Image (cartoon, rainbow, N blue to C red):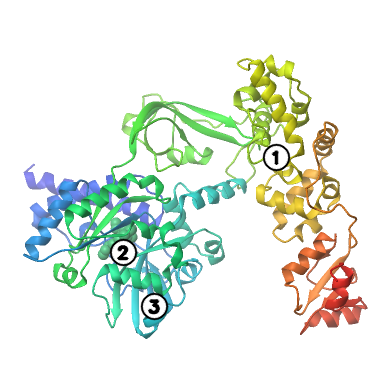
Amino acid sequence: MSDTTTLGAQVDELRRLIRRHEYLYYVLDRPEITDAEFDRLFQRLLRIEQAHPELITADSPTQRVGGRPVEGFASVQHKAAMLSLDNAYSADELVEFEARIKRALPDERIAYVIEPKVDGLGVALLYEHGRFVRGATRGDGRYGEDVTQNLMTVRSLPHRLHGSFTTYAALEVRGEVFMWRQAFDRLNRGLEADGDEPFANPRNAAAGSVRQKDSRITASRPLDIFIYGVSYAEPDPFTDHWRAMEQLLEAGFLLDPKDRKTTLERYRRRCAGIEDAVAVCREIEAARDEIGCDCDGVVVKVDAIEQQRRLGSTTHHPRWAIAYKFPARQATSAIRKIDISVGRTGALTPTALLDPVEIAGATISRATLHNADEIERLDIREGDTVLVERAGDVIPHILRVIHERRPAHSTPFRFPTRCPVCGADAFRPEGEVVSRCTNSACLARLKESLLHFGSRRAMDIEHLGEAVVEQLVDRALVREFADLYRMNVETLAGLERLAQKSATNLYHAIQGSKGRGLSRLLFALGLRYVGEHVAAIVARHYGSMDRLEQALEAELAEIYGIGPRIAQSVALYFRQPENRRQIERLREVGVAMEEAGVSAAPRPLAGKAFVLTGGLETLTRDEAKELIAQAGGRVTSSVSSKTDYVVVGKDPGSKFDDATRLGVPTLDEAAFKKLIGRV
Ligand code: IVH
């Protein structure tokens, strides 16, 4: 074979690989390789094509950017092509970037803007006369998907721009839709609690949310946007990138202008020369974990728009900008074992135990595997060599298996069908991703429940750590929450590694937690869907465990801030005789069952059903609902013979007529307030 044939074959193979990974990334949202690996493939192809222009074909991935839009969204043409960025991996490469610019613009002063390269989904936002009219994904760079409805739900995306922007016929703003890491973690916890599959990373979560068919789902996702450019303006008022960004932020892209310091904007800087720019890149790199969202690098841009124009672009990237990529935080390691732990809700969670490996300064020996589906999806097996990523403060996870290094005779991992701790059946409901141990008395679940019970935001029992809980359960000293309060100093001092003094401290910490109040107790009991916030609402509403135990599901669902799913879970919990007995025993050992500050007085409207119609003058509808709920009543949406009162405000609707027709008593605002004791 001649050299060009082998080169030709190489180029074909590179193109095939690049297309496949573009498809996985852009269309399926399921990348199998890292961005850095993708960049390397791309750069290899680019270099060969540069050296052998005769090999370039019109359909080569280097001649266009990105992947095809998915079916289902209308296709829209961008005002200007959405290009990619050239990459630099070292300070030297940034200096080379400047040298290229200086050659094209000799003797000119070049100022730069440095900004984070946010890892999310690139979008183009079209404004006409200051009004947001269209939002699109990047698609293939020229045509994108119309995701206007979905982008409308992103809170920090202004539907109208203020000031002079209302006079521009057309303005296309570019930005990255992304998720803050904390919001992402919260979202995934919620998805998991609902038995849904969590997202692998914030980028996938953002991309998946923007490309949702149902914009109500997008609206429920914690999306944010970071703007990084203007690609088209008619007329064009901008002289430099820095000012353009400032003006756009002022015109509406920054929710609260006083909030600047807490947003990504604090990492946007202007520098007079490349040396300063390199220093800023390093500074931002060092602050990588504090940024709060995934950034895979920083972008260095020539500030003056006029210089940008003269520098122009290749088909792939502008010559006036470059992405300085942070070093990958990935490494390969071998899986020694796949460990299954049992959580407090019985969820079986797999973790990969790895040969220790250092990634960006930390020794990693475990990685989360999420659930059985994830293991199956990536075909992860014990003994496999895998690519591990450590992204910010997120628990390390596995990106893919390196199949070439799979040991001979390896067998697919079989997810257990029984609880690895108690041996009871594990059950995975249809359509859910999580398998759970079905034994409510499983000791692994008990240990986790006790740890949660004593945790800082629950009953706050200091010194009740893992080692202690482990022994209390293994020695059969504790079988339920109330047993904790039955421990005396002597028993505690009998535990290993617990000196007399520590045992005394622990004893006092346990006894001292009795008076934490209903809200913390409810959270500590660990009812499904009852987090701290919900526990506080319920505790404030009912004031005591007695009342809560009597509550009906329909009544709970009427409380402002409590949805039907939570109401059902709480009602279900209190219907179980064993749960009631557990609470009774906590009461016997002296745990307080009341919420401080909430009156225990009898509730005058217990069991009464209300309907509200028309506007009240001194109360909002939510306030009225809350007052009714506090007095023991509930609010329903339509009038029936079961309705006790219809509260009639200004401009009442047809419900007033319904009340008259059915003979249901009506109350005006004054009478209503009298009834609830508010006058
Ligand atoms: S400038 C024509 N600035 O990274 C200039 N892009 O890898 C091209 N990105 O498609 C984009 N943060 O979606 C620019 N501060 C930033 C960015 C940024 C994230 C994304 C963008 C782009 C991709 C290129």
- Depth check: 423 or 112 in front? 112
Q: CA distance from mark 3 to mark 1?
A: 50 Å
Is 338 rendered above or below residue 40?
above
Q: Quadrant of ligand 1?
A: bottom left
Q: Position of residue 457 (x, y in %)?
A: 64, 41
Q: Secondary structure at mark 3?
A: strand
Which residue of the protein is positioned furthest toward the right in this rendering? 663
> Is ligand 1 closer than 8 angstroms to the Cβ of mark 3?
no
Of the numbered discs 2 and 1, the one sitting upstream in the chain is 2
Q: Which mark is residue 524?
A: 1
Q: CA distance from mark 3 to mark 2?
A: 21 Å
Is 518 rendered above or below residue 452?
below
Which residue, given by chain and number where applicable, does mark 2 sit on? 140
Of the numbered discs 3 and 2, the one sitting upstream in the chain is 3
Q: Amino acid at mark 3?
A: Tyr
Q: Quadrant of residue 69?
A: bottom left
- Depth check: 232 or 116 in front? 116
- Of the 4 image quadrants, the one containing the N terminus is top left
